[in-house]
Amino acid sequence: MNIQQYQRTHLDGIVALCEAEGWPSFGADLDRAHATLTAPGVTSVVALDGELVIGFAYLLSDGHIASYLSMMATHVNYRRKGVGRALIDYAHPLTGAQRIDLVTDTAEDFYASYEHHRTFSGFRIYP
């Protein structure tokens, strides 16, 4: 497994991971997805097995205190093999932030496995 910063050549693999999760946003407009993954204040990383994108994460950050894990996915055949942790561990220092905030409804046990965590209740608003 190789973790590296996102490049446009990774986009098809990321879209495939998102579609497998039932997340249609990135696949609907590839130029918009690329712009999202490379926007100012965004850190996007991928996990590769050879040329295959097996995971990705993208975080938004103020570059100082807070970052937000906006999206992360791992290919179903690579789960529970350290891919998610490797993505977060690689991406976090690149954000420049002290902490990562996130919202999840599917991976509570994974995020709770981090030694220094605190759980909050949260909301996602779609205006």
Image (cartoon, helix red, strand yellow):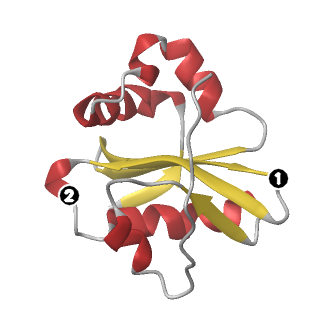
Kindly identify the residue that appears in the image at 62 percent across and 28 percent down: 36
Crowdedness near tag 1: few (<14), some (14–19) or many (≥20) residues, C-alpha within 10 Å: some
Mark 2 → mark 1, Cα distance in angstroms: 31 Å
Q: Is residue 127 above or below residue 87?
A: above
In the picture, the quarter occupied by the C terminus is top right
Side of 111 relative to 74 (left or right) = right
Q: Are marks 2 and 1 in contact (CB under 8 Å)?
A: no
Task: Confirm whether residue 75 shows in the render.
Answer: yes
Q: Amino acid at mark 1?
A: Asp
Image quadrant in which you'd find residue 22: top left
Kindly identify the residue that appears in the image at 56 percent across and 13 percent down: 31
In the picture, the quarter occupied by the N terminus is bottom left
Tally of numbered tags: 2
Q: What residue does disc 2 label?
A: 78
- From this viewpoint, which residue is outermost toward the left? 77
Q: Residue 62 shows which numbered tag?
A: 1
Q: Position of residue 68 (x, y in %)?
A: 64, 54
Task: Confirm whether residue 96 shows in the render.
Answer: no
Q: Position of residue 42 (x, y in %)?
A: 69, 43
Kindly identify the residue that appears in the image at 82 percent across and 57 percent down: 63
Crowdedness near tag 2: few (<14), some (14–19) or many (≥20) residues, C-alpha within 10 Å: few
Q: Position of residue 121 (x, y in %)?
A: 55, 61
